Structure formats: structure tokens, C-alpha cells
Image (tube, rainbow, N blue to C red):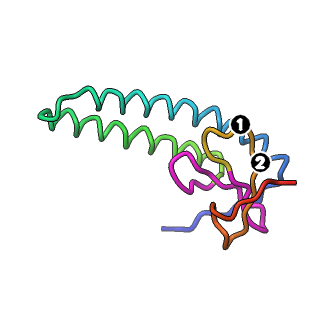
Amino acid sequence: MAERETRSWSLATAREIAVEVRRITAGAVAEVDALEVRRGEIGGDDKAAHVALGQELARAVAGWVRAMEALGVEVKGRWLVDFDNGRGYYCWRWPEEQLEYFHGYDEGFAGRVRIQ
């Protein structure tokens, strides 16, 4: 499998795209939340229904991942994306309103700091 070309984001461009990231993520979160509520309403004996809903959940999250990748951002976890800027990552996760954090390549999410 060929490795994708890494995009280098300016802060201004990343913040512009983050608006779309948030919009798409809000829809995916609502869809997944609704599916999880349905799964909770199914009786424990209905294995087929649990499996079907599990597949729907997986499809919903996979659709979100594809949408994020189409925008050129890196998915780092469920509802968590990074924008590579050549020195590290601008980092966003649901439900943050804006792109406000950065971390280096080695620090990861736990080492993120607010952008000055």
C-alpha cells in the first residue's frame, strides 16, 4: 500500500478546515449516539440485533474517518484529528469549538498545549 503524502497546514488554513471538521463530526457523533441508544434498548438475548447495530456503528465511524481523510487531516482516534504543520500537529477533538491546541511529533495528545 502506498503511503499518503503528508500535507503541511498553516494555522489559518487548519482553522478554516476545522470548521468543516467540526460540522461533519457533529453529524457523526449524533448518528453514533442514536445508534448507541438503540443498542441499549435491545434486550440482551437479541444477539443478531446487537451484531447489526455494532456493524452500523462501525460503518458510521468509518464514514467519519473517510470524510476526515478526504479533508486531508489525520485521524488519531474517535473524534480526534491532527493537522500536520511540519513542526508538529495542531490538534482538535470533539466537542471543542475551535482549533486551539498544538503538540510536537513526540509528545502526542497528552502533551498538547494551547496555541498562543
The label on residue 32 is none
Q: Name the residue under label 1.
A: 97
- Judging from the image, what secondary structure is the residue with disc 1 in? loop
In the displayed orientation, state which residue is furthest to the right.
116
Is 68 on the left-hand or right-hand side of 37?
A: right
Q: Name the residue under label 2.
A: 100
In the displayed orientation, state which residue is furthest to the bottom.
106
- Tell me the quarter of the picture where residue 115 sits: bottom right
How far across and down, in percent of the image, does residue 64 sit? 51, 41
**Looking at this view, is 101 or 4 the one in front?**
101
**Looking at this view, is 111 or 30 the one in front?**
111
What residue do we see at 63% from left, 60% from top?
109
Q: Is the residue marked by circle 2 packed among few (<14), some (14-19), or many (20+) residues within 10 Å?
A: some
The magenta span reads: 74-91
Is residue 84 inside the magenta stretch?
yes
What residue do we see at 50% from left, 48% from top?
78
Q: Is residue 13 above or below residue 107?
A: above
* Three-letter amino acid code of the residue under disc 1: Glu
Q: In this view, does 2 lie above or below 76?
A: below
* Three-letter amino acid code of the residue under disc 2: Glu
What residue do we see at 76% from left, 59% from top?
113
Callouts 2 and 1 close, C-beta under 8 Å = no
Q: Is the residue marked by circle 1 packed among few (<14), some (14-19), or many (20+) residues within 10 Å?
A: few
Is 69 on the left-hand or right-hand side of 16?
A: left
